[in-house]
Image (cartoon, helix red, strand yellow):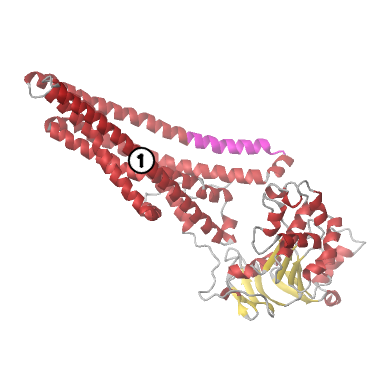
Amino acid sequence: MTQEQDDKPKKVDYRLLRRLLRFLRPYRLHIVCAIILTLTASALGPLRPYLTRIAIDEHIAKNDMSGLMFFVVLIVGFLLLQGLMQYALSLLMTWVGQRVLLDIRNTLYRHVQSLALRYYDTTPVGRIVTRVTSDVEVLNELFSSGVVMMISDIMVIVWILYFMAQTSWKLTLLTIIVLPFLLIASFIFRAKVRRVYNLIRRQVARMNAFMNEFVTGISIVQLFRQERRMTDEFGAINREHREYQDRSILYYAVFFPVVELLSAVSLSIIVWYAFGNILSGEMTIGILIAFTQFTEMFFRPVRDLTEKYNTLQSSVVASERIFDLLDTDMKVKDTPNAVPFNGLQSGIRFQDVHFAYDGKTPVLKGVSFSVGKGETVAIVGATGAGKSSIINLLCRFYEFQQGDIMLDGQTIRSIDQHSLRAHIAVVLQDVFLFSRSIEDNISLGRPDISDEKVVEAAKALGAWDFINRLPSGMETNVRERGAVLSVGQKQLISFCRALATDPDILILDEATSSIDTETEQLIERSISTMLEGRTSIVIAHRLSTIQRADRIVVMHHGEVAEQGTHQELLALGGLYAKLYALQFDNTSSTTPTRQN
């Protein structure tokens, strides 16, 4: 089970927040409108207690009913206006927030697609899913209300202090005596919550990684009766997540009563001050009622600011993770002047290629061989000999350290990867099908592959018969990873997918090793048609399938041990001859070695 690497919460870097806010640039006009609404609405709330004091002291106390009605209508009007502004503000910021999240997710998804396979070799899938889904969702409140509402709360406090000072500056000073204690409580609360938010995000990523691994390997779990152990492991992760959530609830449960207590203390000071000063005439009933409302209003935005700050903290933690992914530059790069690949003209050549997945442990050591246009070259060898690594390098999934791979005399690094792969089709041993129709799995939605091409490929490879027997034919949904199809049927679909693209270069990476004998015979009857006129590289552990290859390259410990035709290699009596003897000696009880 993997665990997030960043166990300890990092110091908040507000440069990340500023970088995050750049996603708001396309919506500058909307943000300006939201700020104008915020500044206006924030003044209307504190204005009501100020008008209430005038209504009581200037009109109720003097029995001026006409003047009182004017202020009542004025207060109600301001209340309705504030409500309309808050509605418009909420609607506007939610609209902006959802579009910003859409932009961030699309940016992340495009970046994830551009990363080299080496990144996926070392990064749990659950962690990537968490970055693109959960971590982005954390930003929802920040963009929907967080930033603008923080400005609103600050302005509300400023307006409250202004109207309080206009009403009674002495009472204002007495009221804010408790403010230092409130700031201390907020500082402690923020520090505690920041750490627990980081731990919660880590646990969410761990749960996602665990669930992805568990669901992918569910057949193995059930086959070896590991349900109880896996349940215990998930339960441990889930309990730890719950403990962190409980801790955050505890912090909130302590902080908000402290705020209410300080608010009550402030209100008690007002009442104490009013007790002696109303009787002496230095203070009026209107001032008492107004300051009671001011006090209630004052502590509400302070409390909200603390919550919004926690939202900010959580968003900064999420943005650290998001930008950590966006800043990952694990890509196979073309040269700046890379040109499109328009199809193979003369051939492929590996020249003294050295390669290591981790940059240290060599997998290929000085590999050199060539494949002429229209030739079929087979690559054989024991498990770990480096056969599949050759394919990975030819498809530009990884970057080799030394040597070069030439296509038509041109280094592969100077060829645009996207156009190169458009001319290559690969059939793998481990077939991956999407939870879509058979037609979609063959064409992969490419506009240049018509329905007629899909049908032609299915008929050419003998897949048409079993497809027609399915309930919905070509429109049958194969479900996740092709669950409704047999192993052989899935392999046939992968062959159809490769043939439909009409590739210049065809690669078969142990493509028949998982197929039953009947299906293999069906494919072998059509495979000569599939290879005809194409440059083909075939990796196989069944040597019977590659005897007709123009050349066979024998790999051993990452090096080319032998090259030649089937008959030449048998006559040589070397490694290939030994492999052949192991598979076809009727007197031998040795099981044929499964290649990689």
Give the x, y percent position of residue 32.
Answer: 31, 50
| Mark 1 element type | helix
Q: Name the residue: 67% across, 50% down.
A: 436
Using the image as rendered, state which of residue 453 and residue 199 is in the foreground: 453
Q: Work out which residue is located at the far right of the displayed protein and give it.
A: 587
Which of the 4 quarters of the picture holds residue 394? bottom right
Q: Position of residue 312 (x, y in %)?
A: 37, 44
Q: Nearer the viewer, residue 24 or 171?
A: 24
Whether residue 328 is visible to the viewer of this picture, yes or no, is yes
- From the image, which quarter does the C terminus lie in? bottom right
Asked whether residue 233 is drawn in magenta, I would say yes
* Magenta span of residues: 225-243
> In x, y percent, where is residue 129?
55, 49
**Residue 4 in view (yes/no):** no
Say which residue label 1 marks.
88
Q: Is 12 one of the magenta-colored residues?
A: no
Q: In the image, 77: left or right of 284?
A: right
Note whether 543 is above or below 32 in the view shown. Answer: below
For residue 530, side relative to residue 100 (left or right): right
Of residues 567 and 581, the one nearer the viewer is: 567
- Looking at the rendering, which quadrant does residue 251 occupy? top left
Q: Quadrant of residue 360?
A: bottom right
Main SS, magenta region, reads helix
In the current view of this chain or complex, which residue is farthest to the front? Answer: 66
Above or below 409: residue 19: above
The amino acid type found where label 1 is placed reads Ala
Horizontal placement of 62 versus 585: left or right? left
Say if 77 sits above or below 131 in the image.
above
Residue at image position (17%, 37%) is 162
Left or right, 96 with reference to 58: right
In the rendering, at what x and y percent does residue 175 appear?
19, 30
Q: Residue placed at 48% from the left, 43% from the top?
A: 201
